[in-house]
Amino acid sequence: MEYDVVVVGGGTAGLAAGMMLARSRRRVVVVDAGEPRNAPAAHLHGFLSRDGMSPAELLEVGRGEVVRYGGELLEGRVRDVERLEERGFRIWLASGGELTTRGVLVATGLRDELPEIPGLRVRWGMDVLHCPYCHGYEVRDAPIGVVGGDNRPFTMHQASLVRQWSADVVFFPNRITVDAEERERLTARGIRIVEGEVARLVVDDGRLSGVELADGQVVSRTAVFVGPRFVPHDELLTELGCEIGENGWVAADAMGRTSVPGVWAAGNVVAEGAQAINAAGAGSLAAIGLNHYLLAADVEQAVADHRVAGERFSRA
């Protein structure tokens, strides 16, 4: 095999895995298409010792650490992963190249599908947000809106949660129907509910200034939270035959092991709620798990070679 491990995806999880495997003196390459999920955000938060750093800077530092320990980086996209009959995998690149490896660690993340509301996507990661733990403190005490999206459970929880950061929260159910109990709970929390379909976000001088409804009413807001529909980039895993869990996502244990021998997964591709710091930890754990898997094979091979050598010696 050309590599011990090919890591697919060079975000926080993939780079943490690559560094740990390189430090374990494994032949590892991280293949990355250069499309991180958090690219629109200017800063990341809640990451101990890296709070306030830009996502781009964090990844640049991570890439340097992988290379420092002997790991390799390859810019590109993985088109397919083929399981070889004898053992290991062949990685087909979109560019036409191929790699061979004993193990695969998939850290391809997810994509955020936002409601089709004009102005929402262009402000994403700036003053249109989804995670209050990541960005709530930066908009504390501001006039905040929560806009209903396709992810109903997430949105309803978000509407109540965001109230911790501001006393001025307006919930726009948009196309969500709020039942009597939910309405009472939100109202008790001091959250104002404004019904009606959201037509667009209003932006003045490069800043969000309000939420406009279909009837023309504009509610002044300087930050908006929305619950995206999280869609994992798990095609490589599903095509390999990895089992799907009850939640509809590829199943992986606490160390990132999937149901396919030699295939691990880490980060948002198998955990929708993983923040950057969680993804880094998951990547490190998956790397350790995969290294132990390779170690077992190494020991098995060493014992087999030792026995063959002993038989040869006894016949000599």
Image (tube, rainbow, N blue to C red):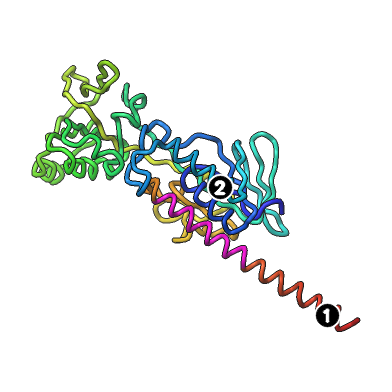
Spatial separation of the CA atoms under disc 2 and disc 1: 42 Å
Residue 262: x and y in percent read 60, 58
Please state if 53 lies on the left or on the right of 189 as rendered.
right
Question: Which residue occupies 45% across, 54% down?
Answer: 282
* Residue at figure coordinates x 70%, y 42% from the top left: 98
Percent coordinates x, y for residue 102 in the rendering: 66, 56
Q: Is residue 189 left or right of residue 100?
A: left
Residue bearing mark 2 = 66
Given the image, on which type of amino acid does mark 2 rest? Val
Along the viewing direction, whichever of 211 and 275 lies nearer the viewer: 275
Q: Residue at x 77, y 78 (%)?
A: 307
Q: Secondary structure at mark 1?
A: helix
Binning the other alpha carbons within 10 Å of mark 2 as few (below 14), some (14 to 19) or many (20 upward) gives: many
Above or below 281: residue 142: above
Identify the residue under disc 1: 311
Label located before the other in sequence (2 or 1): 2
**Which quadrant does the N terminus fall into?**
bottom right
Q: Nearer the viewer, mark 2 or mark 1?
A: 2
Q: Is residue 63 depicted above or below 2 in this figure?
A: above
What secondary structure do most residues of the magenta stretch adopt?
Answer: helix
Residue range in magenta is: 278-295
Residue 124: x, y in percent? 34, 29
Mark 1 closeness class: few <14, some 14–19, many ≥20 residues within 10 Å: few
Which is nearer the eye, 28 or 192? 28
Q: Is residue 13 left or right of residue 113?
A: right
Q: Nearer the viewer, residue 256 or 194?
A: 256
